[in-house]
């Protein structure tokens, strides 16, 4: 998997694309998340009322209150997300494409 940032005027500053061996995800802040996998493109548009941090906090608190609820992510998924975030920050700092080990 590779993470790259391109500090040029050709791409909007509020866009992030992550490409892996089996597909990719493109986030355009305030517009949508597009998932490319298995030869398909699926777009998940943002709603004006979307508040990702509030949604995450509400879900966490619901899981604390009701132990039968399953977290939205498992620990491996959460760690993978942190590795991607670290790679994106390193790419911004160094101005290079960063490869994330699988």
Image: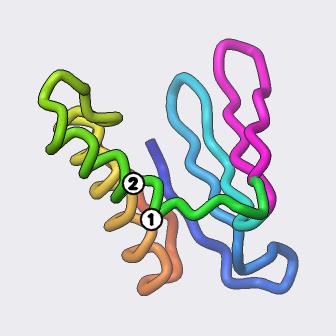
Residue 8 image position (x, y, % from top left): 76, 84
Give the camera-side residue of 13 and 56: 56
Residue at 24%, 26% in the rendered image: 69
Which circle marks residue 56 in the picture? 2
Q: What element carries label 2?
A: helix
How many labels sit on residues? 2
Residue 88, picture quadrant: bottom left
Q: In this view, does 15 lie above or below 10?
A: above
Residue 22, picture quadrant: top right
Residue at 65%, 59% in the rendered image: 50
Q: Is mark 1 on a helix, strand or loop?
A: helix
**Left or right placement of residue 2 versus residue 78 in this view:** right
Counting other residues with Cα less than 10 Å from the Cα at mark 2, is it few (<14), some (14-19), or many (20 or more)? few
Q: Magenta segment, which residues?
A: 31-46
Residue 72 image position (x, y, % from top left): 34, 34
Label 1 belongs to which residue? 53
Residue 38 image position (x, y, % from top left): 66, 13
Which circle marks residue 14 in the picture? none
**Left or right placement of residue 70 versus residue 50 in this view:** left
**Left or right placement of residue 79 versus residue 89 in this view:** left
Residue 1 image position (x, y, % from top left): 44, 41
**Left or right placement of residue 26 versus residue 71 in this view:** right
Q: How far apart are marks 1 and 2 (CA)?
A: 5 Å
Q: In this view, does 11 lie above or below 68?
A: below
Residue at 75%, 53% in the rendered image: 46
Q: Is residue 84 above or below residue 25?
A: below
Q: Are marks 1 and 2 in contact (CB under 8 Å)?
A: yes
Query: Is residue 34 within the magenta segment?
Result: yes
């Amino acid at each position: 998997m590779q993470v790259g940032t391109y500090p040029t005027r050709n791409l909007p500053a509020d866009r992030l694309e992550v490409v892996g061996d089996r597909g990719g995800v493109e986030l355009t802040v305030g517009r949508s998340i597009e998932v490319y996998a298995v030869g398909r493109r699926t777009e998940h548009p943002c709603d004006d009322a979307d508040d990702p941090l509030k949604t995450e906090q509400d879900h966490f608190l619901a899981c604390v209150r009701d132990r039968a609820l399953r977290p939205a992510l498992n620990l491996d998924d959460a760690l993978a997300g942190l590795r991607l975030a670290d790679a994106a920050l390193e790419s911004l700092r160094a101005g290079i494409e960063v490869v994330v080990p699988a």
